[in-house]
Image (spheres, rainbow, N blue to C red):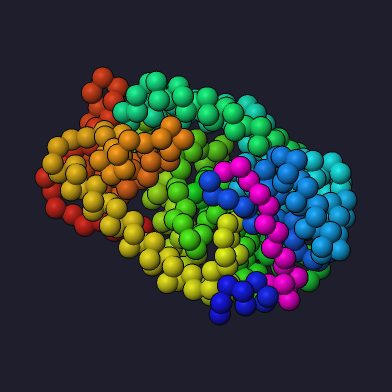
Amino acid sequence: MTPEEALERARAAGIHRLRIPTPFAVGRVNCYLLDDQPLTLIDTGPNSGKSLDELQHQLERLGHAIEDLELVVITHQHIDHLGLVEIIASRSGAEVAAIDVVVPFVESYGTDTERDDDFAAALMLRYGIPEDLVTALRSVSASFRGWGAAAKVTRPLADGEALELRDRSLEVQLRPGHSPSDTVFWDAERRILICADHLIAHISSNPLLSRPLDGLNEAPGRRPGSASLGSASQERPRALVTYLRSLARTRELPAQILLPGHGQPITDHVRLIDERFALHRRRATKLQGLIAERPRTAYELAQELWGNIAVTQAFLTLSEVVGHVDLLIEAGVVRETTDRGVVRFEATGKEGEVTIPG
């Protein structure tokens, strides 16, 4: 099945892709209109006049208006997916649904994004990013906040529950990793998965080292998915480990079409996920070789891989490096050491094989 055929099949099932512009390098975001009762929009695009205009025009081409919407569903906490939620809800009176663990974040967006920046700054300093670069990146992050907005969630969703519409039932499935709140919606009857940024055909979803959400703040040594940031009260997620476990769950679904948050539909998710597993093994192996040469910080490892790093990419590359080193730590071949508050990774001298969590 080609991507065009997949889109046509989705349209026949009442699922229409809306491609909304964003100011970010990833390009347009895919939102989905479910022509059902209630009339449902999954994700909205960022908080901008251009995005709102495009959304209105694309809805009009389908015979609808923003005021017709009855339910808005948020797939995860990133600003290109939730920025217009409050505007749409206020104009239409639509209910707003989101996975329960992200509700406090969405409703206190401004305060929680500031906490996110504090968390990210502490991580960057701890993993070797120079202070002037951290300061610059905080300024960039603050300038992005206006693309998001707080919204009142009127319908919290639980992992595993059914979101019932007139013509379909969507199973709500929490798939953390790319963000702590990634949620996919599974239409078992049609074998269609609306997967947002959990899996994207043309790029590998970056599992970001996000501040754990309330209810997902896992203590080290108790549950998988987080690691110590220096004390029991300071934790960082093992985002890539968590993400790979989530991918392994998605791999088992008998899906025929995956509708992602960016780019084209996915029609062979098992093959794509297996390719991503292989990609992450290769990246971890490359880092293992660099660490075997001498201990390095995550920032030094990122420079070895990508050279001088743009300010806007510093936290992305940190997440990339630390995520793959976590796989090496799990394999027992690398450990963290701390000197004057800065973490370096060093080889343990043991032999081990990187495995993909499943």
Q: Position of residue 256 (x, y in %)?
A: 56, 75
Q: Report the quarter where the N terminus lies.
A: bottom right
Judged left or right of residue 246, residue 61 is right
> Is residue 184 placed above or below 9 in the rendered structure?
above
Q: Is residue 222 above or below residue 69?
A: above
Q: Is residue 16 magenta?
A: yes
Task: Give the farthest residue toward the bottom.
Answer: 1
Where is residue 51? Give x, y as percent.
72, 46
Question: What residue is rendered at 70% in x and 59% in y?
Answer: 18
Q: Quadrant of residue 261?
A: bottom right
Residue at the image position 55 percent from the left and 38 percent from the top: 213
Residue 227 vs residue 141, the one in the foreground: 141
Q: Left or right: 342 with respect to 86?
A: left
Task: Tell which of 138 and 153 is nearer to you.
Answer: 138
Is residue 164 something one can see in this rendering? no
Quarter the C terminus occupies: bottom left
The image quarter in which residue 3 lies: bottom right
Q: Total number of numbered labels?
A: 0
Residue at 56% x, 77% y: name it.
2
Q: Is residue 59 above or below residue 21?
A: below
Residue 173 position in % (x across, y down) = 59, 58
Residue 259 is at least partly visible in this image: yes
Residue 181 position within the rendered picture, expressed as x and y whole percent measured from the top left: 57, 47
Give yes or no for residue 62 being in the magenta stretch. Answer: no
Which one is in front, 35 or 57? Answer: 57
Q: Residue at x 41, y 35 (%)?
A: 310
Q: Which residues are magenta?
A: 10-24
